[in-house]
Image (cartoon, rainbow, N blue to C red):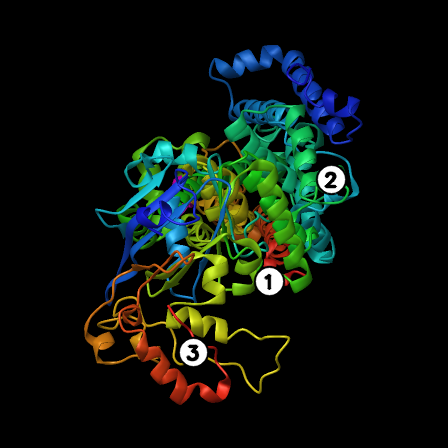
Amino acid sequence: MNRVLPGLGHLIRGQRAGAPILFGWLAGWAIAIGARDRIVTTLEGGAIDGWLALITLLALLTGSWWAGNRRPTVGTGDSDLGGQSQWVSAWRRFTRHRTALLGLLLVVVLCAIALLAPYLAPYDPDVMPGDLVANRFLPPSLDHPMGTDRFGRDILSRVLYGSRVSLSIGFLAVAIAISIGTLLGALAGYVGRWVDALAMRFVDVLLSFPRLVLLILLVALFEPSLALVTVVLGLTGWMGTARIVRGEVLSVREREYVEAARSLGFGDRRIVLRHILPNVLSPVIVTATLGIGNTILAEAALSFLGLSVQPPTATWGNIIAEGNDASLVDAWWITTFPGLAIVATVMCLNLVGDGMRDALDPRTER
Amino acid sequence: MSDRALSSGEISASRPLLSVRDLRTWFATDRGVARAVDGVSFDVRPGTTVGVVGESGSGKSVTALSILDLLPRPQATIQPGSRILFRGEDLTAASEDRMREVRGNEIAMIFQEPMTSLNPVMRIGVQIGDTLALHRGLRGPAVREEVVRLLSRVGIPDPSERIDAYPHQLSGGMRQRVMIAIALSCRPSLLIADEPTTALDVTIQAQILDLLRSLQQELGMAIVLITHDLGVVSEMADEVVVMYAGQVVEGGRVKNILERPGHPYTEALLGSLPDLRQRRERLEVIPGSVPEANAWPAGCRFNPRCAYAWDRCRTEAPMLEAARRPRQTREVRCWLLHEPERRGVVASTENATDGAPEHNV
C-alpha cells in the first residue's frame, strides 16, 4: 500500500508522521498532472524556472516516496521511549535558541516567497514597460516599492524572482558539494592509507586556489547557465566537508560499536552507511547550512561579474551589477535592495547554522 | 592444555570446538615489532567455559581479536605457523567472506564497555534486528517478535517498550544485556566475552554472570571469558589459561590451578586478591608491571618480577610443560617444575611471615 500511496500505511497504523508524507505525495502528483503542458514545454528546452520547478517536483515525489517506504525498521513503534532520538533532543535544544529559530522562520518565509514569486511580484520582472522614458529610474514609491531600473523594470519583482535563482543555486550547489565531500571524506577516512593520502593532497591543492579564481576559470570555459553555475559552485565547495567528514570518520571508526558491528559479521558498506555516517552527520549538517550562505554570496559575486545566469533573467548579483554604474549614486535603490536581500538571507542562514552547531554538538549536551 | 593433556586424566577426550595453536600476533610499531601474542595455544571444548586471565598488556584481548580476525590492519599480522582451528577449519586461512559468516553467526563477541559498544543513534531493537536479518534472514514482523523474545530472555523488563529505546536511555547493566542479546541472537556455538563485567557495578556483575551461565546451558555454547578477575574465573570457568607477556604461563582445570597455583605469576595474582575471611594488613602486590611488548625480558619473561627467580630464569626461557601428578593435569611454563626445591627455599625465608601456604608442584 505504501508503494502506491506512501504515508497511508503510517496513518492506518496510527502514526501521525504519515500525514505530511501522504500530503507531499498527493500534492506532487496533483501539480505534475495539473501542469502537464508546462512540463512538456520545459523538457523541450524551456526556461530556467521551469527546470527549477521540475527538479523541486521530482525531489518532492522521490522524497515522500522514500519516507513512506523506508525499510521498516524494528523500532518505529509509538512507545514513550520512541521519540527520544538525538534529533528530537537536538531540536529541543535548537528551539531554545531564539535567534536561530527566528532565522529558520525567515529562511522558510524566503523559500515560500521564492516559490510564490509569480503571485507576489506586482510586475513582470523581465519585460520593459511601453513608455520607457516615463518609467525608468523611478525612486521607491507606492507603485514601485523598490523603484525601477534603467529599463523601467520593477526592482521588487526582480528581487523576488532573483531569490529563486539565488536560493536554488545555494541549496542545490551545497547538496552537490556535501555529497561529494561526504563520499570522498568517508572513503578517505575509512579506507585510509594511500586513498586517504591521495584524497587529502587533492583537497589541499584545490584549497590552495582562491575559490573565485577557480569559479571564474571554470565558468569562463563554458556558456554560463544556471546548471553550469550550480555544478561549478558544487564542485568548488566540497573540500571543507571532505576534511570534516574524514576527521570524524577517523575517530568514529575506532569506536567500540564499530568493532562490535564487525564482530557480528557486518560488511564494510553496511558499517559505513549504518554505523559511521549517521554518527558524523551533525557537523555535516552544520557546514551545509553555513555553506548555503557562502554559496549565495559566491553566486552573487559571479553574477556581478556577469559570469552567472545571464540577463535579462534577474539574479541578485546581476541586479546589483546593473545599478553599479553612473546610476549608483543617483539611483541608489537599484543596488541597495538586492544587496539587503543578500545580507538578510545569508545572515538568517548563518543564524540557523550557528543554532544547529550548538544543538548538534555533543559537547553542549545538557 | 595440549593434545597430550586432553587425552589424559579426567579431562574428557571430546574434540575441541576451538583449538588455538601457537598463535603469534605481532604489531609493527615505530619502536620495532611488538610481539603482543607470542605462541599461545589452548583448546575450548563444546559447552565449556575457558577463562583467560592476565594483567593489562598480557595479550588476552589481542588473542580474542585474532580469533575473529578483527585486528587493526595493517599494523597487526598473524605470523605464519599460527593456527586457529574452529571445528577443524583453520580461520587464519579463511577468506574475508567466510569470516563474515563466522562472525556473529558461529562465534560472537561481547565487549567490555556496554556504554560504547552500542551505536548511540540507533534504537536497540534495530541493532538487534539487523543481526537477525543478516544471519537468520528474518524479515518484517518476525524480526520484531524475535527481538522482543530475545530482550525478555536476557531479562529486560518491558521488552516491547524498551525495543524502541536508544542506548543512552538504558543503564550499564541493561546495555550489557542488550549486547548479550545481540551476540546470542544467532545462537553461536562460541561466545568470546572480553571483560564483560569489568565496567559494571558488583551487584550487576553477578546478575550478568548468572545470565551468561543460564544462556550457556540453554544454548549449549562454549565461552571464552577474558578477565583479570580471578573471582569471576572461579565462578564461571571450567578451565583457565593464565597469560603473561604474550604467552600462556599456566593452564588447566580451574579448581586445581586456583587451589594450588603452579606458576609464581598465578600465585602472585591470587595473592593480590582480597580475602574476606582473613583480614590482612595489606594486599600483596606484584612489583612492577607487564613489560613492553617490543622488549620482552630475556629468559623467562616473568623473571624481573618473580620472587623465586634465579640465574637460570634470566638466561633460559622455560617451555610450557605438563606437570603430571595424580589428578593434577595442568601445564606450567616455569623452571620450578624442574627444581621444585627452590620454591621452598624462598618461601621459607621471605614469605614465612605472610603465612603463605607451601606449594608442591
Q: Secondary structure at mark 3?
A: loop
Q: Establish if A259 lies above or below B218.
A: below
Which stretch did the figure color magenta? A235-239
Task: Please state the chain letter of the residue tagged with numbered disc 3 in the rendered image.
Answer: B
Q: Secondary structure at mark 2?
A: helix
Q: Secondary structure at mark 1?
A: helix
Residue B290 spot, x, y in % from top left: 36, 72
For the question of whether residue A348 can be seen, the reply is no
Q: Residue at x 52, y 31 (%)?
A: A313
Q: Residue furthest front?
A: B326
Tag in front: 2 or 1: 2
Q: Kindly report the distance in space between the C-alpha atoms of the residues bearing marks 2 and 3.
A: 45 Å
| Residue labelled with disc 3 | B286
Q: Which circle marks residue B159 in the picture?
A: 2
Going by the numbered disc 3, the residue's amino acid type is Ile
Please name whichever residue, B76 or A218, is drawn nearer the observer in this view of the structure: B76
Going by the numbered disc 1, the residue's amino acid type is Arg
Looking at the rendered structure, the number of numbered marks drawn on it comes to 3
Task: Please state the chain letter of the residue tagged with numbered disc 1 in the rendered image.
Answer: A
Q: Main secondary structure of the magenta part?
A: loop
Task: Please state the chain letter of the residue tagged with numbered disc 2 in the rendered image.
Answer: B
Please name whichever residue, A68 or A302, is drawn nearer the observer in this view of the structure: A68
Q: Earlier in the sequence, mark 2 or mark 3?
A: 2
Please name whichever residue, B72 or B257, is drawn nearer the observer in this view of the structure: B257
Residue A144 falls left or right of residue B138: right
